[in-house]
Amino acid sequence: MSDAPSWHPETLAVRAGYDPASASNAAKPPIYMTSTFAYASARQAKDIHEAYFDGTGPEVGRPGHIYSRLSHPGLDMVETRLAALDGAEAAAVFNSGMATHSAIALAHLRPGDSVVFSRPIYGGTNGLYTALMPAFGVGEASFTDGCDRADIETAVAAALAHGPLKLIVIETPANPTAAIVDIALVVAIADEVGARTAIRPLVVVDNTLLGPLMQRPIALGVDLCMTSLTKYCGGHSDLLAGGVSASEALIAPLRLLRTTLGSHLDPYTCWLLLRSMETVHLRVERAMDSARRIAEFLRGHAKVAGITYLGFLAEGSPQRAVYDRQCKAAGSTFSFAVVGGEAEAFRFLDRLRLLRFAVSLGGSETLITHPATTTHYALSPDERAAGGITDATLRLSVGIEHVDDLIADLAQALDAV
């Protein structure tokens, strides 16, 4: 749709990627439940394969399909919609967020290369870069203050001592503490590394906690914008998906790698995701309104030792300046710490009646978890401490229930601490 780029994100979330004329004028996208696609002729079969694998020939830009592991109409629609929301040229969608992260790593890292990443970071991403990739000879280094040039440059120097720096991977706001990384600063450092070494690392941003509506990393100069679509875009805790947006030149190799890995998103889940993306802005806005009220309640409670809600960043701090510059809102996922440690946190969790104690975030229901013993269990105590995760830390993902009911449940559970 040629006029789509002029539409607001809320409109793109409903309309981008689907033309009713392509499906018997059905108002909503159908589910293409097929594993393979018939060719009109032998010549067309060759042309479609040339277009997919070489990017040349008369079928380039046409909706020809081969086999659903390579692509299918539902996947095309989701990828077009995600790219539109992220303000990118193209997107590749996978069957989970970690499948997306893994594809990026496998596409760009080779033995002898190195990667830099921010802390805290999702536990699965941490394992990818501290356990799996080092087994293939990839070096790694990390930084904890994403707003401090010296801290980032120290990690970059450590990585370069191992070998060529190919990726800088940042998660901002970070899981679970909502720590901020200055995207523009990281992009500038990547440019400087490229000018100095003749190899510019790609900047990858995990945009899950705010994306795609409340933060636009592509507009800030990043190369690859990754989002766990399981979370807010899926938004109902009933599907797994992940996506990455970028230029077509960066996305095309990821699609080919996905063909080999077999990590595509299936037709039914694509249909569910398209349906959920239509209401993402409504759910996110409601959850963010409730999150602010809940954060205000927690901040003033005697049994809460600290809170990481982005709306409370101190005026005049480097983090606040970065937040004001690159984020449109504070989101609805943050962490807080109860007074005490693991025992007090466990008493609090076991007392909850409405909030659901479960991993993941961004669902229509409010979820709470204890990162040290769940999502970040596999990290060492030192790694958790470096990311600001203590035995008293609790991560809260606010859903769309009535806020008064949520606050009442938190209040009665805090009485047990």
Image: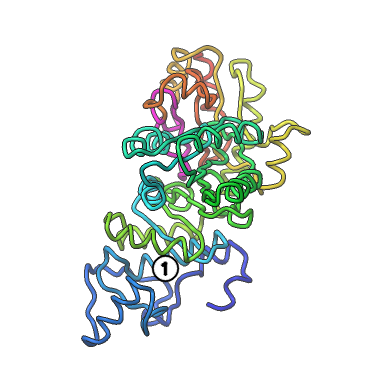
| Rendered image quadrant of residue 33 | bottom left
Q: Which residue is at the front of the view, 156 or 80?
A: 156
Q: Residue at x 24, y 75 (%)?
A: 37
Q: Is residue 76 above or below residue 407?
A: below
Q: Residue at x 41, y 64 (%)?
A: 252
On the image, the x and y values in percent for residue 186 come to 61, 44
Q: Which residue is label 1 attached to?
A: 77
Q: Left or right: where does residue 261 sit relative to residue 177? A: left
> Start and end of the magenta stretch?
353-375
Magenta: predominant secondary structure element?
Answer: loop
* Residue 288 is inside the magenta segment: no
Q: Secondary structure at mark 1?
A: helix
Q: Which residue is at the front of the view, 5 or 105?
A: 105
Q: Left or right: where does residue 349 sit relative to residue 293? A: left
Q: Left or right: where does residue 175 sit relative to residue 42? A: right
Q: Which residue is at the front of the view, 156 or 262?
A: 156
Name the residue furthest front. 197
Q: Is residue 142 above or below residue 182?
A: above
On the image, the x and y values in percent for residue 201 come to 52, 48
Report if residue 283 is visible in the image. no
On the image, the x and y values in percent for residue 416 come to 49, 14
* Residue 358 is inside the magenta segment: yes
Q: Residue at x 68, y 41 (%)?
A: 323
Q: Amino acid at mark 1?
A: Met
Q: How is the image coloured?
A: rainbow
